[in-house]
Image (cartoon, coloured by chain):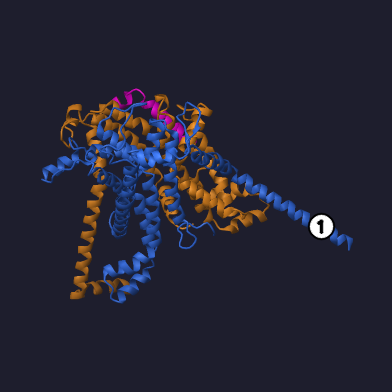
Amino acid sequence: MATITLASKRRRSGLAAKRRKKALRTAAFMSPWLIGFAVFFAYPLISTVYFSFMHYDGFKPPTWSGTKNWTYVFEHYPYFWPALRNTLWLVVVTVTLRVLFGLGIGLLITKIKTGTGVFRTLFYLPYLAPPVAATMAFAFLLNPGTGPVNSILEKIGIPAPGWFNDPNWSKPALTLLFLWGVGDLMVIFMAALLDVPKEQYEAAELDGASAWQRFRFVTIPNISPIIMFAVVTGVIAAMQCYTQPLVAGKVASGVIQGAGTMFEPGYPERSTLTLPQLVYNLGFQRFDYGSACVVALVLFALSMAFTAFLMRRRGGLIQAGD
Amino acid sequence: MTQVLDRPVELKTPASPAERTARRKALLEWIAIHSLGIAAALFFTLPFVFVFLTSLMSDDQALSRDLIPHTWEWANYRKVFDTPGFLTWWKNTLIYAGAGTVLVVLSSIPVAYALAKFRFRGRNLSLMLVISMMMLPPQVVVIPMYLFWAKQLDLSGTLWPLIIPLSFGDAFSIFLLRQFLMTIPNEYLDAAKVDGCGDLRTLLKVVLPMAKPGIAAVALFQFFNAWNDYFGPQIYASENPAAWTLSYGLESFKGAHHTDWNLTMAATVLVMAPVILVFFFAQKAFVEGVTLTGVKG
C-alpha cells in the first residue's frame, strides 16, 4: 500500500514538474515576441489613448484637455474629412480595380503557353520596385510638361490629363501606380487558379457550359477565398497608404524638400491626403501630439474592424487553430 | 516497330472539318492570348524603359519631350554617386536592412516554432495578436514610440530606433514562418524526441534545415521592407542627413535637383536595381513567400 501511494505521488509531482518545464519552455521560445508585444504594441497603444485626451506639444509637460482634441479633429481640422474621403476612395476604387486586374493578369498567365517564365517575371518585377522609387518614376512618367506618357498621348491626339497636378486626376494616377505593382496578387491568383480541379472544368464542358459559364460557376467559387483575402488585405493596405501619395504630392508640387521644411499636405487641393499622413502632419509638423493620437485611434479602429473580418471564426480567411 | 508505323498513317488521314475548325480555334486563341500578354508586358515594362532612357539623357534633353537620348550620358550615374550623402545613404540602408534581417530572423524563429508546434494555453490568442500587430498601421503607435525614442532615450537622428525593435520578432515574419513550419509533419519532431533530442536541438538540427526556404523568404521580405521603408527613417532620421537611408534620401535628392529629371531617374534606377538583381537570384523564395501569405493557415 505504502509503496503504491508513494509511487503515484512521485508520478504526480513528476507530472507537475514536467508541466512547469513545458510552460517555461514555451515562455522561453515566445519571449522575444512577448517583450516586443508589451513594448511596441500594448504600451504605445495605451499611451496613444492617453495622449488623445492630453494637450501635448512635446516641450511643456502634457496637460489634461478632455475631448478637446477629438472635437478639434472632427470639427475644425480642415484635413480630416478630405483625408477620410480619400482613404475610402482608395479603399473602394483602387482595391476593386487591383483585385480585378490582378485576377485578369493571373488568368492570362495561366493561359500563356509560350515564354511563361519571361512573362511572369515581367509582370512581377514592378511589385518589387521600392515605393519611393516607383512613385518618383510615375511622377516623372506622368508629369504634364516633359513626361513620356503625355508626349505619346498628344502625339496620337488624345487630350493629356494633368495627373498628379490635377485634383481630379491625382487619385487615378495613384491607382495606375498601384495597378502597375499588382505582381503579388498575380502570384496568389495564379496559385489558386492552378489548384482548381480539372475534373470540374471537364464536367462543366460535358454539360455544355460556355467559357463564361465555366469561369462563373467553376473558377469563381473555387477561388473565392483567395478573392476575399485579396480584398481584405487590399483594404488594410489602402488604409495604410502613406508613402506614395505623400511623395507624389511633394514631387508634383515641386517643393524643395529638406529637413524641417513645412509642406502643405495632399497636393493638389488635398486630393492625395490619406489618414496616415495626418498623423505625421499633426504630430511632426504642428507638434500637436494629442490630436495626432486622435487620428491614430480612428485609423486603429478602422484597421481592427477589417482585421476582425479577416479572422472571423467561421468563413474567416486566417484561422488560428490547426 | 508498330509504333513507328502507326504514326505516319495517323497523320496521313485528312483532318475532319470539325478537327480543322478546332485547330484553327486553338491557333486564334494562342494568338489572342499572346497579344494580350505582350500588351500587358508593355504596361509593366515601359515605365522601367522610359526611366532608364531618361537617366541617360543630357541635362537639356531631360527637359524636352524626347523619348530617346541623343547622346548616352553614362556620366550621369557617376554624378549621382558624387552627390554628397548618396554613399552614406547606401551604407545606412545596408546597415538597417542587413542588421535588421539578421535580428528579425533570429528572434522570429523560436516564436514561430512555438506557435506552430507547441500546444499551450493562449496559443490561438497569441496568434490572433500577432496577426493584429501585422495589420496595424505603423502610424497608430508612432507618437508614443517617437516620444519614447527621442525624449526618453535621446536616440532620434540615429538608426537605433529602426533596428532595435527588430530584435523582438516581427509580426509578419512570425506569421509567415509559422505558416511554413505548419507544413513540416510532426512525425519528424516525434522521431527527434525518441532519439533523445531536446526542444532546442530539435529546432536547430531537424526543423531549421527543413525550414530553409521559409527562412529565406522571411529574410528577403525583411531586407526589402527595410530597403523600402520611408516612414521609419522620416520619423527617426530626418533631422540628421548622416542617418538618412536610400528611400528617404531619394526623395530629398529630387528636392535638391528639382529640375534634373535625368539625375533623379539615374538615382531612381540605382535604388531599384539591387532589389531586382536580388530577385533574379532568389525568385523561388520570393514567390513561395507571397503564396504562403495568401493561403489559409
Viewer-proximal residue, A223 or A53?
Answer: A53
Residue B80 lies in magenta, yes or no?
yes
Which residue is drawn at the image coordinates 21% and 68% (left, top)?
Answer: B23
Residue A280 is left or right of residue B68, and the answer is: right
Quarter of the view holding residue B85? top left
Amino acid carrying mark 1 in the image: Lys
Q: Which chain gets the blue colouring? A: A
Residue matched to label 1 = A9
Q: Position of residue A11 (x, y in %)?
A: 78, 57
- Colour displayed for chain B in the image of the structure: orange
Quarter of the view holding residue B31? bottom left
Which residue is drawn at the image coordinates 29% and 30% (left, top)?
Answer: B254
The quadrant of the picture occupied by the C terminus of chain A is bottom right
Residue B120 lies in magenta, yes or no?
no
The dominant secondary structure in magenta is: helix
- Badge count: 1
Q: Which residues lie in the magenta part?
A: B79-99
Is residue A207 positioned above or below A162 on the image? below
Q: Position of residue B296 (x, y in %)?
A: 46, 58
Q: Residues within 10 Å of mark 1 (few under 14, many from 20)?
A: few
Residue B60 is left or right of residue B85, and the answer is: left
Quarter of the view holding residue A1? bottom right
Viewer-proximal residue, B163 or A162?
Answer: A162
Chain at tag 1: A
Secondary structure state at the residue bearing disc 1: helix
Which residue is drawn at the image coordinates 43% and 35% (left, top)?
Answer: B232
